[in-house]
Amino acid sequence: MTPPVEVSRAWAADGAAHLRGLMTRLGDDAFAAPSALPGWTRAHVLTHVARNADAMINLLTWARTGVETPAYADDAQRAADIEAGARRTPAEIRADVEETSDRLAKVAKAMPAQAWSATVRNRQGVAIPAAEVLWMRATEMWVHAVDLDAGASFADMPLPMAVELLDRLVRDMAGRPGVPSMRLVADDDAREWTVGDGSGEVVEVHGPVTELVSWLCGRGCSRRVRTGDGSRPPQLPAWR
């Protein structure tokens, strides 16, 4: 279920401010350094964040006008735009991230209430309500803040958002090849999640909510994430 628009809007705004703070503190020479994403520098991550804002504006425009406006022209153009944008100066990248983020916030604020229930399609071609766009943006902000490898962690994320993201990660894992049946137990939230149908051997994994999120989305597994017998949890296929 999609969170209420105002809740997702707040998470997206807080995430944008968090990422902007990290970006502002980076020295110019740090933009060319590797990020936590294989093959991408920090400049690539930040350029992607800016182009993602453009993509989300496209989807909100689609919802508001009824005129089909895909998030991206196609995957090849998306990749080319990120690659070209990552070669710009740090000043240009900073300005781009800030301008596109601010423009998205203005477009979202001006959306008519009824437009949030309009149906659009995400990058994968899946039909979603327009209200999902702000959740998608919030996820991009908080996850890519970690990907910058500039000191952020999932512990910075608001706990209710981390719980929502964990719910979704568990659903995404359902039926995927290479994912064992698991029972996830949050040490800090008195919640449990079941991955798979529970058939066969079920692996029990314990950890704080935000560290379970980090593990499930392939952003690192801390020592606090352990199976019931104290061993390391299974390795999972890439989330995205």
Image (tube, rainbow, N blue to C red):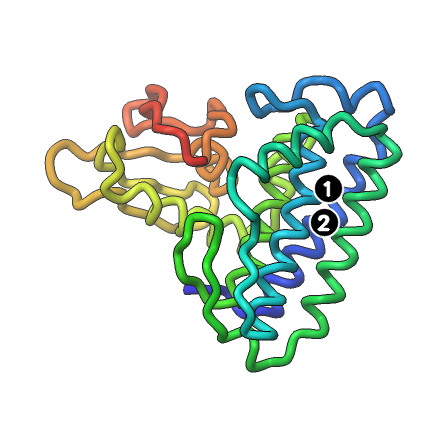
Q: Where residue 145 sits in the image (x, y, percent)?
A: 66, 37
Residue displayed at 85% across by 28% down = 89
Q: Badges 1 and 2: C-beta atoms under 8 Å apart? A: yes
Quadrant placement of the C terminus:
top left
Mark count? 2
Q: Secondary structure at mark 1?
A: helix
Q: Where residue 205 sits in the image (x, y, percent)?
A: 33, 33
- Mark 2 = which residue? 16
Quadrant placement of the N terminus:
bottom left
Badge number at residue 19: 1
Q: Where residue 40 sits in the image (x, y, percent)?
A: 62, 23
Q: Residues within 10 Å of mark 1 (few under 14, many from 20)?
A: many
Residue displayed at 50% across by 26% down = 220
**Where 12 sits versus 4, above or below?**
above
Q: Is residue 216 left or right of residue 57?
A: left
Residue displayed at 22% across by 36% down = 181
**Where 48 sits versus 64, above or below?**
above
Q: Between 170 and 148, which is closer to the camera in this rendering?
A: 148
Specify the amino acid type for callout 2: Ala
Residue displayed at 35% across by 45% down = 172
